[in-house]
Image (cartoon, rainbow, N blue to C red):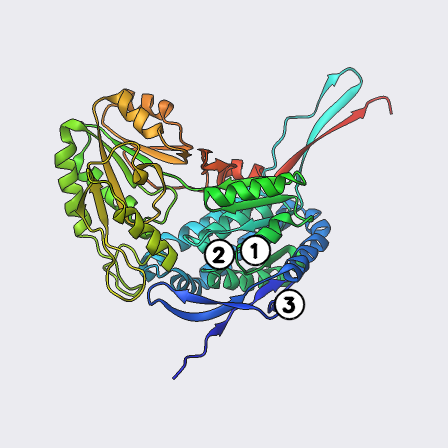
């Protein structure tokens, strides 16, 4: 007996719609490897419709006072809390994530982040007005940019969606958001919730729109003449393509493009705590996190002991079905990602050693064992490139200078951490490490008040914080004569 697939739809101008040409794509649950829904494979007509809706809604939304934008976001946050179990179920079906961890580790931060940006809506900052030329007064206006085209990734579909729409709406912009083609379910549900709040408060229907589809859909959004800004979280290749395309009509671009976080462990660290925290931060969400603690650098004096302890901790970590309360992480997101992670292990050089793991788990879904690899050199492929899977590599260093050189010796520059009891050393490393975030004796916590974003090929622009809010505004100088 064939199970009927659930039908997901675009959300455009306050209405759920199929793709104009009727095309769809199957959506697969990565925990089972089986399709559970279809989603629109949106084309040019769908993108045109969403952009037209967002463009038409912008003037009215731009002119809504900050207190009313705050009210909208606070009601969205409340609605997300009220419908949390639905969001958790949709996200787990999207991604295979454990239900319990999604409930505790994603819903509360998402709601908090929306509420943070609700407050930011009323904190537009600029230099004070003043006379910088005799007889003339200058002041600064902070204004919304316009329509924002936003593309969210498959590793955190809900949370990354929040990181995109919340600051954009808070600043007075309108949004067209595209989820990944493998994870549209929770984004479509968020559209239902947000659309309901917009309607209840009497705001224009086109303020928030969702268009499902593949890379071609995303490309059409980026190339479309309406958006004034494009925001994407994705691969370096995708970011380069977006930046090139957006340059043709000088769109503003916001890019978060992945990482290869170094975890620098010195000989004076609390090894038991470091091993426990690093293994959790490396394997959480199956390592599918741009900030994951997956590239460990350990002082040579404790290298062997640390590797043994880390391998033991990894071997005790479980992956499995979303309803298993004992698992730390679920499957990789899709068959291509499973093949990518497996390929890195299959291509390891002869000098590398797989301490534990290194294989697929089961024959159903896309599960991969927690893996630790030692004996690696700085120019090895697995050191230089993002695996985006449950694989932690370990290298040895001799001194602080070499640790910094190894840490900085990759093209990514999103996040890093330092593990030491020496405060002065921690301060030196926090200055020397060329990464957008440096954690000290911890790894992976994020708070709404602090920025998230990298350097080099990890992209530019900030998520979260007042800096992330500012990215969705433009600055205008207004000067008036005092002579009437």
Q: First in sequence, mark 3 or 2: give its number.
A: 3
Q: Secondary structure at mark 2?
A: loop
Separation of marks 3 and 2 at Cα, in angstroms:
19 Å
Q: Is residue 259 visible?
A: yes
Front position in the image: 431 or 22: 22
Callout 2 environment at 10 Å: few (<14), some (14 to 19), or many (20+)?
many
Front position in the image: 110 or 120: 110
Q: Is residue 129 left or right of residue 340?
A: right
Identity of the residue drawn at 64% across and 40% down: 251
Q: Is residue 51 left or right of residue 265?
A: right
**Residue placed under numbered mark 3 in the picture:** 20
Residue 205 position, x and y percent, is 66, 60
**Residue placed under numbered mark 2 in the picture:** 180
Front position in the image: 460 or 445: 460
Q: Is residue 142 left or right of residue 462?
A: right
Q: Is the N terminus in the top left, top right, bottom left or bottom right quadrant?
A: bottom left
Identity of the residue drawn at 36% across and 49% down: 288
Identity of the residue drawn at 17% across and 52% down: 316
Q: Assess whether mark 2 and mark 1 are in contact (beta carbons under 8 angstroms).
A: no
Q: Is the C terminus in the top left, top right, bottom left or bottom right quadrant?
A: top right
Residue 311 position, x and y percent, is 17, 45
Res 216 label:
1
Q: Is residue 119 visible?
A: no
The residue positioned farthest toward the right in the image shown: 484
- Residue 307 sits in which quadrant? top left
- Residue 450 sits in which quadrant? top left
Q: Assess whether mark 1 and mark 3 are in contact (beta carbons under 8 angstroms).
A: no
């Amino acid at each position: 007996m064939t199970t009927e697939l659930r039908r997901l739809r675009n959300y455009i101008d306050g209405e759920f719609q199929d793709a104009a040409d009727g095309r769809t794509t199957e959506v697969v649950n990565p925990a089972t490897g089986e399709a559970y829904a279809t989603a629109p494979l949106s084309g040019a007509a769908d993108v045109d419709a969403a952009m037209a809706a967002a463009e038409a809604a912008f003037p009215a939304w731009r002119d809504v006072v900050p207190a009313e934008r705050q009210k909208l976001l606070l009601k969205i946050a409340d609605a997300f809390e009220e419908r949390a179990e639905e969001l958790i179920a949709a996200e787990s079906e999207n991604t295979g994530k454990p239900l319990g961890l999604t409930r505790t580790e994603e819903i509360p931060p998402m709601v908090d982040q929306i509420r943070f940006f609700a407050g930011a809506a009323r904190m537009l900052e600029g230099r004070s007005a003043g006379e910088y030329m005799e007889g003339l007064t200058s002041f600064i206006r902070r204004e919304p940019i316009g329509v924002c085209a936003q593309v969210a990734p498959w590793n955190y579909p809900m949370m990354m969606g929040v990181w995109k729409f919340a600051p954009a709406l808070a600043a007075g912009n309108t949004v067209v958001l595209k989820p990944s083609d493998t994870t549209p379910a929770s984004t479509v549900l968020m559209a239902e919730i947000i659309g309901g709040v917009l309607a209840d408060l009497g705001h224009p229907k086109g303020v928030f729109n969702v268009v499902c589809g593949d890379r071609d859909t995303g490309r059409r959004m980026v190339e479309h003449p309406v958006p004034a800004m494009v925001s994407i979280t994705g691969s370096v290749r995708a970011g380069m393509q977006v930046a090139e395309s957006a340059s043709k009509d000088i769109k503003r671009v916001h890019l978060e493009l992945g990482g290869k976080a170094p975890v620098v462990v010195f000989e004076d660290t609390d090894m038991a705590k470091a091993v426990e925290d690093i293994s959790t931060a490396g394997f959480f969400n199956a390592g599918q996190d741009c900030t994951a603690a997956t590239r460990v650098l350990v002082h040579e004096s404790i290298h062997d002991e640390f590797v043994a302890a880390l391998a033991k901790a990894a071997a005790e970590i479980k992956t499995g079905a979303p309803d298993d309360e004992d698992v730390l992480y679920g499957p990789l997101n899709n068959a291509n990602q499973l093949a990518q992670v497996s390929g890195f292990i299959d291509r390891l050089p002869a000098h590398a050693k797989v301490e534990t793991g290194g294989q697929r788990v089961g024959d159903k879904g896309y599960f991969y064992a927690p893996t630790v690899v030692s004996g690696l050199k700085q120019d090895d492929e697995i050191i230089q490139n993002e695996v985006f899977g449950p694989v932690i590599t370990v290298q040895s260093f001799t001194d602080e200078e070499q640790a910094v050189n190894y840490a900085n010796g990759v093209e990514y520059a999103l996040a890093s951490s330092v593990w030491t009891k020496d405060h002065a050393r921690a301060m030196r490393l926090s200055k020397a490490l060329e990464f957008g975030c440096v954690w000290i004796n911890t790894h992976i916590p994020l708070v709404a008040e602090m920025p998230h974003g990298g350097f080099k090929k990890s992209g530019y622009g900030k998520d979260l914080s007042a800096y992330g809010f500012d990215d969705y505004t433009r600055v205008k100088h207004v000067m008036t004569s005092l002579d009437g």
